[in-house]
Amino acid sequence: MSKRISINAMTGALAALALLGLMVSAAPSGAVPQIMAEYGDQMGWRGADINAMGGTGIALYRGGLSNIYNPAMLTGGPDNGRFDLSISLDQEHEDRFQPLFDSFNSWVADAAIASNREHYWQTGFAIAGAPLGEKTPIRAGLSLVDRYPFQYTFSEELRNPSPYPPGSGDPARDQIIELREREVRGTLRTLSLGVGADVEDEVSIGMAIHYGFGVRKETNTVRDYVVEGNSYNDVTEYDMSGVNFSLGARGKISDRVELGLSWESQLNTTGDYSNSHYDGATDVTTDTNWGGYLRYPNIYRAGLTFTPQTDPRTIFTIEMEFMPWSELADSENPGYDNPQDLQDTFDVRIGLEHRFYNGMPLRFGFRHYDSYANRESAASVFSTGGAFAIGRGEVSVSMELGKITSILPHQFPYPDDYFGDAYETDPEARVEDTRFRVGVGYTQNF
């Protein structure tokens, strides 16, 4: 028996070390659509078991990751502790379309003008336990997650569209006139420490403190092969940090119904901006530095979990998150009266888990959330996943598919006199974002 236990422990340790190695070696994290590149992702990664169930966790125990959702739920797990480690691969597809008209000014079709495919990684880590002993009503959790990834890449080629032979001094047919690229990199991560305590058998409260830190770097590049003076390269970087906290409550309405409520305060980051601008017309690079701030809004969360009287066990949970993005304050867009017209958002999440007689779970989830950057845009996300035992722990896998369509201004302006008046461009494009993410995580109770 002891030999079997040692083998299981070794297998679990090897699995945890393998996932930890992937986390350390993972390159840029979190692909996001264009409308989330400014202030961060609304579909962040937490863990394979969590994301498979629609990202739920307000009224459901999530180990140390309950710091993020509802620190009062730290008391909802086993008496000992829990370790979580996860990684995900994110594939972001962006297609941009323009209306195409014939010579009689009649709409023909939406023509694709740019298409981008990018892949990124995200990671998550958490540990929870009873630091004062299993017999005490206090539980604590520590977590590190990619809270607001900014990763986004856009590139396009501006070519000579004329089907006719070029005139004197004109670029050749289909010649590349400009290469244009916008690249956003960086992640605002949060290191969180939370504590939950049972007030009585049916009620728990909790508090977590979050230290946010990270860098957002945006690079805009234009390489003009016809007029070299139009070329430029602009790089802006914001190195930020800040602190905020969460308060949560958990209540058991009955043996099968549980309610969770939490509030997260504004995350007010401060830091240093730096900008480097190269102008092709003068062949001069200008560097500037200044201080700034970025204040994220409050977050209000509520969730309900129902455990039907089934054998084997089934869990159903539904929750809602409200973020008044109109509260956001940005030193680069000064003013507290929402100068960017950001939208307050609702995020509805539904999760279902059913465990079979052999202990293996099957999970499903659905999310629907508004965009903070575009009033007319909303995203729907479908997810599924499962798990299997390995060693003394459990390996979870998940898959998510989300789509969002929006009407957005062009990343780079098109010339007004684009080969005379034969070619006209609409000031905006229809942007279709399709996001596919797979994840794997390891969980072990100890």
Image: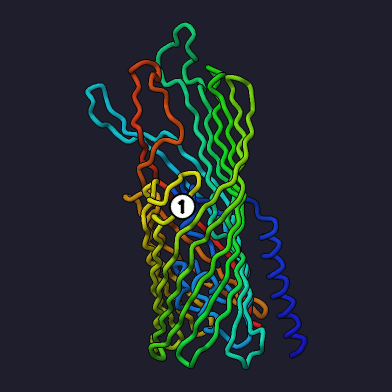
**On screen, 22 above or below 351?**
above
Q: Please tell me how crowded label 1 is: few (under 14), some (14-19), or many (20+) other residues with Cα within 10 Å.
A: many
Residue 252 in view here: yes
Q: Tag 1: residue type?
A: Ala
Q: Please determine whether, in this image, residue 388 is positioned above or below residue 257.
A: above
Screen quadrant of the N terminus: bottom right
Residue 426: x %, y % from top left: 33, 31
Left or right of 366 in this view: 186? right
Q: Nearer the viewer, residue 400 or 409?
A: 409
Q: How is the image coloured?
A: rainbow
Residue 284 horizontal/vertical position (percent): 64, 24
Q: Secondary structure at mark 1?
A: strand
Task: Please give the name of the residue rendered at 57% of the width and 89% of the height, measured from the top-left corner.
Answer: 137
Q: Which residue matches tag 1?
A: 329
Residue situated furthest top in the rendering:
168
User: Which residue lies at the image location 47% right of the left edge and 67% below the top edge?
Assistant: 55
| Horizontal arrangement in the rendering, residue 215 relative to residue 44 (left or right) | right
Image label count: 1
x and y percent of residue 97 in the render? Answer: 37, 37
- Name the one closer to the observer, 214 or 436: 214
Name the one closer to the observer, 142 or 330: 330
At 74% across and 80% down in the image, what residue appears?
7
On the question of residue 52 being in view, the answer is no
Rendered view: 254 above or below 117: below
Residue drawn 38% across the image and 22% down it: 416
Rendering quarter of residue 24: bottom right
Q: Quadrant of the C terminus?
A: bottom right
Closer-to-camera residue (85/58): 58
- Residue 17: image x %, image y %? 72, 68
